[in-house]
Image (cartoon, rainbow, N blue to C red):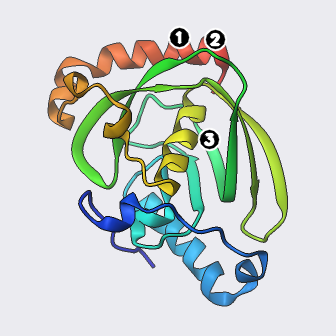
């Protein structure tokens, strides 16, 4: 089932989300919720989505990029469900990522992101996993993790970089595509 996406101004987007117990992941309700979260992300053409974006203050997010018309320049990323994630930065370097958010329609802005991270989390079945993520995809994981801590991308952006989606497409998208290619060439996805 596709869920309603909460919009900026909804207090749940500013909450620090609670951890999910492993036992909860075994329930039919939680399994259905994760399926619904994935379906909602796919329907909205998001690169990722976090539980508070559908009104649930839980430490869960999903990331996936496959032929995404909203982000045609983003490298593909396999579906990853992260429960109770912890992110560790593996370099001091940063790049500026032009981000948007399903909960903030029609706004984009530049956010500094770490291009090489380690993610430790539980999968949707409660099994622990660890992975390194690089490049643009690392920025997507950080964006979704911010949601679990009540942080929205404008909190990390220089307001002078804000634009609507139309203005972004007209004025900045071609340059962003070149920036993404350079980041992918240096860091991988």
> Real-space Cα distance between discs 3 and 2?
17 Å
Mark 2, other Cα within 10 Å: few <14 / some 14–19 / many ≥20: few
Q: Circles 1 and 2: CB distance less than 8 Å?
A: yes
Q: Which mark is residue 5?
A: none
- Which residue lies under the disc numbered 3? 77
| Residue 47 higher or lower than 36, as above or below | above
Q: Is residue 70 visible?
A: no
Name of the residue lying farthest toward the bottom: 28
67 or 150, nearer to the observer: 150
Identify the residue at image location x=23%, y=40%: 107
Q: Secondary structure at mark 1?
A: helix
Q: Going by the image, does 89 lie left or right of 172?
A: right
What percent of the width, then of the height, locates residue 98?
36, 27
Q: Secondary structure at mark 2?
A: helix
- Which residue lies under the disc numbered 1? 182
Identify the residue at image location x=37%, y=60%: 13
12 or 69, nearer to the observer: 12
> Real-space Cα distance between discs 1 and 2?
6 Å
Quadrant of the image occupied by residue 121:
bottom right
Q: Which mark is residue 186?
A: 2
């Amino acid at each position: 089932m596709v869920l309603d996406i909460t919009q900026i101004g909804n207090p749940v987007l500013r909450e620090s989300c609670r951890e999910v117990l492993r036992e909860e992941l075994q329930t039919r309700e939680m399994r259905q919720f994760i399926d619904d979260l994935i379906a909602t992300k796919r329907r909205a053409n998001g690169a990722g989505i976090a539980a508070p974006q559908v009104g649930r203050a839980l430490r869960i997010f999903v990331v996936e990029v496959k032929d995404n018309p909203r982000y045609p320049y983003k490298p593909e990323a396999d579906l990853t469900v992260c429960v109770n994630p912890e992110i560790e930065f593996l370099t001091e370097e940063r790049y500026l990522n032009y981000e948007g958010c399903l909960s903030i329609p029609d706004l984009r802005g530049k956010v500094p992101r770490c291009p090489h991270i380690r993610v430790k989390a539980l999968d949707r079945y409660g099994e622990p996993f660890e992975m390194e993520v690089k490049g643009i995809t690392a920025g997507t994981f950080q964006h979704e993790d911010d949601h679990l801590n009540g942080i929205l991308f404008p909190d990390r952006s220089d307001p002078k970089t804000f634009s609507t989606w139309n203005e972004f497409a007209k004025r900045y998208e071609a340059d962003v595509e070149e920036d993404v290619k350079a980041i992918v060439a240096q860091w991988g996805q």
